[in-house]
Image (cartoon, rainbow, N blue to C red):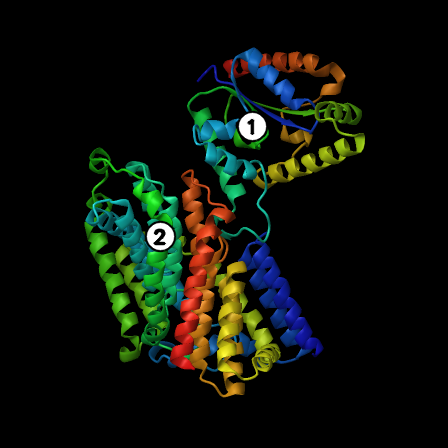
Amino acid sequence: MDDQILITVGREFGSGGHVIAKAMAERMGIRYCVRKLLDEMFEGDEKKISELAHYDEKLAIPFLSRRVRGHSSSPEENLAKLQFEYLRDLADKGESMVLVGRCGEWLFRDYPNHVSIFVTAEETDKVARVMDREGKTEMEARSKMARHDKSRAKYHNTYSDRMWGQASTYDLCVNASRLGIEGTTDMLLSYVEKRREAFKCQ
Amino acid sequence: MSVTQIVALVIFLVMFVLVVMDTIPREYVTLIAGALTLIVTFGLLMRSPEAIWESLNLTAFIHPSFWVTHVEGADSAGINWATITFIGGMMVMVEGLAKSGFFTWLCMNIAKLVKYKPVPLLLSFMVMSFVLAMFIDSITVILFLAAVTVELGKLLKLDPVPMIVSEIFCANLGGSATMCGDPPNIIIGTSLGYSFFDFLLHTGLIAFVSLFFILIYYYLVFRKTLNAEHITEEAIAALPTPESAIKNKKDFYISSAIFGCAAILLVTHAQTGLTVASIGVFAAVATLIANGRDSIELLKKVDYRTLLFFMGLFVVVSGLELTGILKLLANFIGTISGGNLHVMIAIILWLSAIASAIVDNIPFAATMVPVIKALAAAQGIPVETLAWTLAMGTDVGGSATPIGASANVVGISVAAKNGHIIGWGKYCKVAIPATIIVMVTSMLILFARYV
């Protein structure tokens, strides 16, 4: 448990947060939790995984869901809670991980060995990355970025008592345009290393 | 339409939309809407302290008919304190019953009785859900039944989803059979002065006939899935015994006895002259005395939010009633039906069912009770016929969608907490045909018996 490290990465769409988080997990040799979370949770049940993918990291739709005495009918909310429980269970077992999204900084807020990071980037860099990665026009890329960031903020702010993308929510907010993907990864790894030393001293 | 009527209607519609949107706790919504009705509609526009007083209906408690006859509140608009007292009392009793392990014990015994075979398990749990929901609120029934089903599913390696969705449906259907089974029935019964037996003889008969078809329907839908499951002897041996659910034998016997007494009092309340409000108070007081020091804990678990929700709701509906809006609606239904009882039954049944499938059935039922009273008076038809129609529509219509009734939400949530997410598609695929079966059965029986 002493060596455990829980790194949570919030990110703006197109900022390169995913790439940075993945590189950090690979270089540290720890679990990388992102899109494959459903595969892990329902291993071997392909039908269920494809069914649940529709509800993953989405918000409950007003008028189509209801709450009764703390219970919810929303598959989106129920899946989110199930995922939170799964992730907390992993953390309780002493697993180290880099978790992207899913209100990670709120989820692990009470865990001692937790580092929360938010990755942003210059608008032009984000647009260029989305255009390059998805073959979209500039207008399409901007519209997709706005849509995704809005949905991520809503999802985050529904479950967390802090605001998505606001500096006070995280330990460290970084603009990936300044040092580039690799430089930012190096910097963050060095920050994590320093935090690890600090954890040991506590 | 006058300004007063428009204001009362706007307050009601905004409240309804906010309750359905579920973004603000619903008890805040109805209480604020209720306060606006009292201040703006009755106070500022109507300048009628009498309307405020009638809406609050505080004298209900001191009226003997609140306690010892079954005609309470028959002619008064406003807060239906009999409904609130009964529901509150039953909440206390059910908390005591749950604490004693009664529900888990009952479920495990039934499962043992059918030797844990999937198809008999499905059918017996459906019947148990139906019967329990006749006396206890369907939320509690499903909370425990679904939890036991999930546990059995885990130990027997059985998919619990088919059983949970069938249990939910039967809890709603069972609730329609009696006066105390579902909040709309309590509202209808206390507002129009019906007894437990009146419901049993009318909606009860329809519910029992429907149950027969529903058992066949769910058997046909799920037989392949359930027959494919193989329960091993080892899995059965690993199951806990029913007795292990009982935490304290003394509490168990006392709670079961109180439940039994409450059930007998409900069944015989037309003969004894006790109102459902009195029975609710009896059940609560007996449970609190029996639980001694733990009674504070039981009281803390009571769902006060629902009781507050009811209070605000009744005030808002009284705003519609005292300003004459509901009479307009009744006249409208009378006009489009052309005074034909067949058409009136069909409209009320299907309108209630469809509305209850989309929105909470409690506000709908509370609104419709004064409407059917006015409609019956205007058209010269027995209000009973419309009351049974409204009860079946609101109670069973809510079964069609995941949000239609509280039991659906709770069952879906219990399944989800154990890794079984049930979305709209999965739920509606089996629940909508089942609801249509019951609605058609109800309509045919209502036509044959009352027209």
B318 lies left or right of B443: right
Dot 1: what SS?
loop
Q: Position of residue B223 (x, y in %)?
A: 33, 48
Answer above or below: position of B413 versus B253: above
Q: Hey, which quadrant is residue A115 in on the image?
A: top right
The residue depicted at 34 percent of the width and 50 percent of the height is B144
Q: Which mark is residue B220?
A: 2
Residue B198's spot in the image, x, y percent? 34, 77
Residue B186 visible in the displayed image: no
* Location of the N terminus of chain B (image quadrant): bottom right
Q: Give residue A179's position: percent from left, percent from top.
A: 73, 14
Query: Who's the residue at 59% across and 55% down the image?
Result: B21
Residue type pointed to by label 1: Arg
What is the number of the mark on residue A35? 1
**Crowd rating for badge 2 (residues with CA inside 10 Å; few <14, some 14–19, many 20+):** few
Q: How crowded is the residue under tag 1: few (<14 C-alpha within 10 Å), some, or many (20+)?
A: few
**Front one among A102 and B176:** B176
Q: Which chain is indicated by disc 1?
A: A
